Image (cartoon, grey):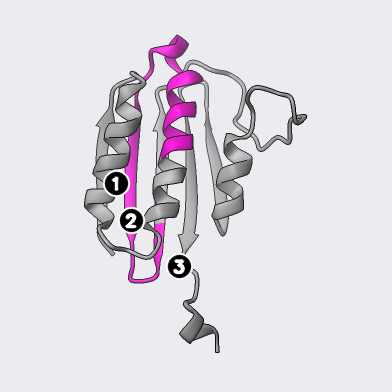
Amino acid sequence: MPTYRRPFAGLPQEVSRARRWTRTVLGPHPCADDALLVVTELGTNAIAHSGGGRGGFHLAVTYTETAATITVTDSGGSSSRPRITHPDDDALGGRGLALVSAYATEIRISGDHHGHTITAELCAKPTEAEAC
């Protein structure tokens, strides 16, 4: 089960770099598209909510033939623990972890003001042939 790790700076353009890197790591993996969405949400949150808006993040991608695990660790600076919320329809934010949880089979959140880690487990959806 290979694991790939890489740090990213706390700049908005680093989220697209993280996506490209994840695509390279996963290639045609059946979880790749979902993984890119998860990386986008978790990377954006890591930059926005750590290091006073200047914090970077570490990304780890692990995969098997039918599953992928995305782990993002921010650089800390926030005492509030990330949590899944369900904001009002007119709210401008707060949907990131809820969106990730809709795609993931499991989410784990850990850490403290020194840094939070969010891990999302993704499983490939069965193809129509496998579902029959």
Q: Are marks 3 and 2 in contact (CB under 8 Å)?
A: no
SS category of the residue bearing label 3: loop
**How packed is label 1: few (under 14 Cα within 10 Å), some, or many (20 or more)?**
many
Give the mark nearer the N terminus: 3 vs 1.
Answer: 1
Mark 1: amino acid: Thr
Residue 130 lies, in percent from the top left, at: 48, 85
Locate residue 86, reporting x and y percent: 73, 36
The magenta span reads 40-68
Residue 63 horizontal side relative to residue 53, left or right: left
* Other residues around mark 2 within 10 Å, as few (<14) / some (14–19) / many (≥20): some
Report, in whole angstroms, how far the alpha carbon at label 3 lies from the one at label 1.
16 Å
| x and y, in percent, of residue 44 in the image | 45, 28
Tell me, yes or no, if residue 104 can be seen here. yes
Was residue 2 drawn as part of the magenta stretch in this picture? no
**Camera-side residue of 54 and 115:** 54
Give the left or right position of residue 1, taking residue 39 as reference: left
Q: Which quadrant of the view contains residue 67?
A: bottom left
Q: Specify which label sits upstream in the sequence, 1 or 2.
A: 1
Tag 2: residue type? Thr
Residue 76 is at least partly visible in this image: no
Other-residue count near label 3 (Cα within 10 Å), few / some / many at <14 / 14–19 / ≥20: some
> Looking at numbered disc 3 in the image, what kind of residue is underneath it?
Ala
Which numbered disc covers residue 22? Answer: 1
Is residue 116 left or right of 96 when viewed as pictured? left
Q: Secondary structure at mark 2?
A: strand
**At x 49% / y 50%, what residue is drawn?**
120
Q: Is residue 58 magenta?
A: yes
The residue singled out by tag 2 in the image is 62
| Nearer-N-terminus badge (3/2) | 2
Residue behind mark 3: 124
